Image (cartoon, helix red, strand yellow):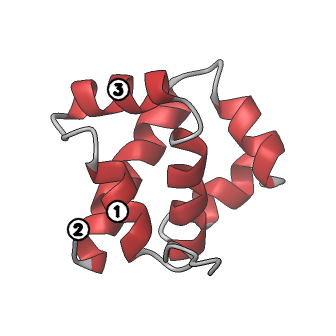
Amino acid sequence: MQRETAETLALNALSWLVAHEELRPVFLSSTGLSEADLRSRAGDPDVLGSVLDFLMMDDAWVIAFCDANGFAYDQPMQARAALPGGAQMHWT
């Protein structure tokens, strides 16, 4: 996946996440971002990567996001791999 496409998907995920009032505070506390930080850094690839990392913590969130936005279930993972820090680690 191209980085621009990954960023667009992650921005969609951020919009979806922010719209869910029960998830937004959990995301903010897990990242240490304030709502002001989130607004000012929404396009930052590192923040977008953290959005996808958070989303992928729960299969139900991935399914709900993808169903709501017309994405295949594997696309958030592909997008994460295309953003900074998303490369798979090889431990061997």
- Residue 23 x %, y %: 63, 26
Residue that extends furthest to the front in the rendered view of this protein: 92
Residue depicted at x 31% and y 66%: 6
Q: Earlier in the sequence, mark 3 or mark 2?
A: 2
Picture quarter with the C terminus: bottom right
Residue 90 picture quarter: bottom right
Q: Are marks 2 and 1 in contact (CB under 8 Å)?
A: yes
Mark found first going from the N terminus, 1 or 3: 3
For residue 79, which numbered disc appears in the image? 1
User: 86 or 23, which is in the foreground?
Assistant: 86
Mark 2 is on which residue type?
A: Thr
Numbered tag placed on residue 63 in the rendering? 3
Left or right of 59 in this view: 90: right
**Mark 1: secondary structure:** helix
Q: Is residue 66 above or below residue 54?
A: above
Q: Position of residue 55 (x, y in %)?
A: 52, 40
Residue 67: assigned label: none
The quarter of the picture where residue 58 lies is top right
